[in-house]
Image (cartoon, helix red, strand yellow):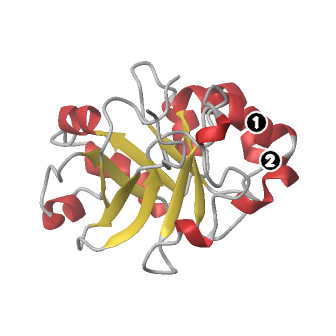
Amino acid sequence: MRNSLYNPYVTEPIHHVKRNVTGICYSVPYLQHNQDSRNILNTSNIISLHNQIATEAALMIIPVDDFRLRGIIAVPDAWSHLQNPRVRIGINYSSLVAHSASLLELTDEFDFWLYDFAPPGADWRLLESFPFSGIVLTEAFFKDNYEKFTFPFFMATFRDKGADVIVRSQTPPLTAEQFTEINISGWQQQRSDGDLISS
């Protein structure tokens, strides 16, 4: 029998290079439109005391699928509870491509993190021009690219704009010192298989 009080939002901690937890990310997209709403807690305000973590300065990353993102774009005031200095909205590349102009208009009200960074054929100019406050690399992308000569310089373009650069993996693939050398801010502990946000 399914427990209707079970909170489906398992969090993934985000560790700074010094290994302290600097934030959490919900591991399923916020308010997926195909979920049974009777089994979701805190749907009206996910930023509540129930969801607080130890440090008040810690970030809360809330991934949204394209359906929900279109709702935020259409009526941003209805999502005012996500306009919080600690909150970041996680989107994926396909949503960025589909809504880049509309999302740019919302960057004064919301902060965005890009998940599932740089799929094959990605428009690098679009990635570099959008004012993300964080980007998250998949473990596969990171392992395929981090030893390339240009990798630290490319990551520096995001860091120079104030964005966190995070690797999402089950365990940290490098030491804190190695992360720092190649302009990586930290890692997010992956607790579910595959991409965080499905296309």
Q: Is residue 101 left or right of residue 152?
A: right
State the mark number for residue 179: none
How many other residues sit within 10 Å of disc 1, few (<14), some (14-19) or many (≥20)? few
Residue highlighted by disc 1: 101
Q: Residue at x 43, y 60 (%)?
A: 24
In the image shown, does 113 or 12 lie closer to the viewer? Answer: 12
Spot occupied by residue 184 in the image (x, y as percentages of width and height): 30, 57
Residue highlighted by disc 2: 105
Q: Is residue 32 above or below residue 112?
A: above
The local secondary structure at tag 1 comes to: helix
Residues at circles 2 and 1 in contact by the CB criterion of under 8 Å: yes
Residue 156 in view of the camera: no
How many other residues sit within 10 Å of disc 2, few (<14), some (14-19) or many (≥20)? few
Q: Residue at x 52, y 80 (%)?
A: 56
Q: Is residue 46 left or right of residue 71?
A: left
Quarter of the image with the N terminus in it:
top left
The local secondary structure at tag 2 comes to: helix
Kind of residue at disc 1: Ala
Q: Is residue 102 above or below residue 162?
A: above
Q: Residue at x 36, y 50 (%)?
A: 155
- The quadrant in which residue 149 appears is top left
Spot occupied by residue 121 in the image (x, y as percentages of width and height): 44, 19
Looking at this view, name the residue that lies furthest to the top: 121
Residue 130 in view of the camera: yes
Spot occupied by residue 86 in the image (x, y as percentages of width and height): 58, 69
Q: Residue at x 24, y 32 (%)?
A: 140
Kind of residue at disc 2: Glu
Q: Is residue 192 above or below residue 182?
A: above
Q: Is residue 173 left or right of residue 69?
A: left
Spot occupied by residue 88 in the image (x, y as percentages of width and height): 58, 57
